[in-house]
Image (cartoon, grey):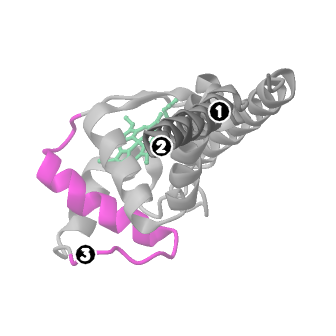
Amino acid sequence: MYKFLYLLILIVLLYGIWNGIHKNIALRPKTHTENCQVCQIVSAQEENIQEELARIDTPEYILHYIVDIIDHGSDTLGFKGGVMEGGYVSHEDARKIACYVLEMSGRKCPHPYPKDAAMFYTSVCGGCHGNDGKGLGGNYPDLTRKKLLGIERREAFLKTMLEKLRIKREEKNSAHIDR
Ligand code: HEC
């Protein structure tokens, strides 16, 4: 009979300890990452931007930018020559012309492209950008620059965004006091 009583007391004691431990875990203050959803969103945005910035000087990125301009045009750079319409050539031809343009700035196109790209460039683009790509004395964008203007702007924009996000994250982190 006593044995049974001892066992009961032991069970009650163990239950008490177990309960105590669990309550403690529940009361433990959450860490920043557990608690601050905004911080998590901000970190994800920062990661995306950093990932794009890491690619911004690669031939693939530049090629994509040039193809996009040939397909859709450009109207934000403010040149005397006015704006550039999109769609002078098919998307397929745009891809090979873009390779030729990329190589004008001393880079290597990541994939092989047909030799007639040069002829396409001269007949479709050369009238404005010049056969040498230098932009006819500043009237049109110089396609031989190390960094094309649109990419330079994008980079500056992303860096500003990154700085804003960093400030926001730091504000959130210091405003958030563990309870
Ligand atoms: C009728 C003139 C004209 C023709 C033809 C033309 N462009 Fe343009 N291009 C411009 C102008 C003007 C701009 C700047 C527009 C702006 O304000 O955004 C421009 C912008 C560009 C840019 C962006 C430059 C930068 O520094 O970011 C690229 C790349 C480009 N053109 C490539 C081409 C290619 C390749 C062709 C041929 C398929 C072509 N262009 C045909 C006038 C032309």
Q: Are marks 3 and 1 in contact (CB under 8 Å)?
A: no
96 vs 136, left or right, is left
| Image location (x, y in percent) of residue 106 | 51, 76
Quarter-wise, where is residue 159 in the image? top right
Disc number at residue 7? 2
Q: Earlier in the sequence, mark 1 or mark 2?
A: 2
35 vs 167, left or right, is left
Indicate the secondary structure of the residue bearing disc 1: helix
What residue is pinned by disc 3?
A: 111
Give the residue type at disc 3: His
Q: Are marks 1 and 2 in contact (CB under 8 Å)?
A: no
Up-down relation of residue 50 to residue 172 (above or below): below
Indicate the secondary structure of the residue bearing disc 2: helix
Up-down relation of residue 32 to residue 179 (above or below): below
Give the residue type at disc 1: Gly
Q: Which residues are magenta?
A: 87-112
What residue is pinned by disc 1?
A: 20
